[in-house]
Amino acid sequence: MPLLLILLLLIPTVTFGQSGSSTDIGDTSFYNFDTFSGSRQSVGKTDFYNFSDGSSTTRNNVGSTDFYSGSTPRLSGSTNTIGETTFGTWQDGTTSTHQSIGGTTFHNFSDGRNCTSNRLGSTTFTNCP
């Protein structure tokens, strides 16, 4: 879920209706949304994200908590997973909840964005109506 979480944070709050996909190939993921693209490289418990708009963030995992250190407040914060639900707190003041039910993950943000993600093989399809 961390890759999708970071992708969803990049979607501008004024632009709803974003859609896209990500594909995992080994320890690297490539993704393409309506207005941005990028990649993630995993090394141990650390993920390095680079985006087409020049922003970046690093995720470090400690137990059930992920810590994000990004180039913008939107990409900095932490998440804590309890069971099937992940709770996020971001330095731009946004909070988020991510819950997997069956094959669908529901992403809800305090700024009103609501997205769904579905995984098919190594590809994840995400829609933010």
Image: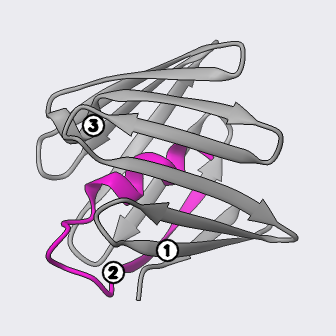
Q: Kindly check if marks 2 and 3 are in contact, taking CB atoms under 8 A apart as contact.
A: no
* 41 lies above or below 36: above
Q: Would you name the residue on which mark 3 appears?
A: 75
- Real-space CA distance between mark 1 and mark 2, rounded to the nearest whole angstrom: 9 Å
**In the rendered structure, does residue 10 fall within the stretch colored magenta?**
yes
Question: Which class describes the residues within 10 Å of circle 1: few (<14), some (14-19), or many (20+)?
Answer: many
* 4 lies above or below 50: below
Residue 122 on image: x %, y %? 73, 60
Segment colored magenta: 1-23
Residue 39 left/right relative to 41: left
The type of residue carrying mark 3 is Leu
The residue located at (48%, 39%) in the rendering is 88
Q: Secondary structure at mark 3?
A: helix
- Classify residue 15 by image quadrant: bottom left
Q: Secondary structure at mark 2?
A: loop
- Which circle's residue, 3 or 1, is located before the other in the chain? 3
**In the rendered structure, does residue 8 fall within the stretch colored magenta?**
yes
- Real-space CA distance between mark 2 and mark 3, rounded to the nearest whole angstrom: 18 Å
* Label placed on residue 18: 2
* 81 lies above or below 24: above
Quarter of the rendering occupied by the C terminus: bottom left
- Real-space CA distance between mark 3 and mark 1, rounded to the nearest whole angstrom: 18 Å
Residue 102 left/right relative to 98: right
The residue located at (14%, 75%) in the rendering is 14
- Classify residue 50 by image quadrant: top left
Q: Would you name the residue on which mark 1 appears?
A: 115
The type of residue carrying mark 2 is Gln
The type of residue carrying mark 1 is Cys
Q: Kindly check if marks 1 and 2 are in contact, taking CB atoms under 8 A apart as contact.
A: yes
Q: Secondary structure at mark 1?
A: strand
